[in-house]
């Protein structure tokens, strides 16, 4: 499953899909993002799409050497279930 940054750089979405599953984020500092909200259309729920969005977002944070606030409850859950050191060192508590 491929993910793309939205044109306005505030979300990730599934590439090639008309129904948009998104993870919204906002830069709150030069190198700090707030991962705010995941949203998956009803037709796609239960397929692990939010998990893929969460992984894409956390990988982006690591690759771009950013710090992240985890406002979204699902991202918090994802990191708790996948406590990779590279993720944990980029999270602001």
Image (spheres, rainbow, N blue to C red):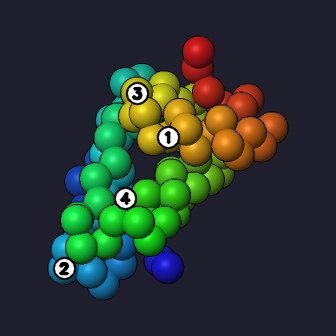
Q: Earlier in the sequence, mark 4 or mark 1?
A: 4
Using residue 57 as the reference point, say whether residue 62 is left or right of it.
Answer: right
Pick whichever, 60 or 43, lies toward us: 43
Residue placed under numbered mark 1 in the picture: 75
Q: Which mark is residue 71?
A: 3
Using residue 35 as the reference point, say whether residue 63 is left or right of it.
Answer: right
The answer to whether one can see residue 32 in this image is no
Distance from the alpha carbon under mark 1 to that under mark 3: 8 Å
Is the residue 62 above or below the residue 16 in the image?
above
Q: Position of residue 62 (x, y in %)?
A: 65, 45
Q: Residue at x 73, y 29 (%)?
A: 89
Q: Earlier in the sequence, mark 2 or mark 1?
A: 2
- Report helix, strand or loop for mark 1: helix
Q: Which mark is residue 12?
A: 4
CB under 8 Å between discs 1 and 3: yes
Distance from the alpha carbon under mark 3 to that under mark 4: 16 Å
The quadrant where residue 44 appears: bottom left
Distance from the alpha carbon under mark 2 to that under mark 1: 23 Å
The quadrant where residue 19 appears: bottom left
Q: Earlier in the sequence, mark 3 or mark 4?
A: 4
């Amino acid at each position: 499953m491929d993910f793309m940054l939205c044109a306005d750089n505030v979300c990730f979405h599934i590439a090639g899909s008309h129904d948009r599953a998104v993870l919204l984020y906002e830069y709150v500092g030069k190198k700090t993002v707030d991962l705010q909200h995941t949203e998956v259309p009803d037709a796609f729920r239960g397929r692990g799409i939010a998990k893929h969005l969460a992984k894409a977002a956390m990988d982006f944070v690591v690759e771009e050497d950013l710090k992240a606030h985890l406002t979204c409850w699902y991202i918090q859950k994802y990191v708790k279930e996948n406590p990779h050191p590279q993720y944990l060192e980029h999270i602001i508590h």
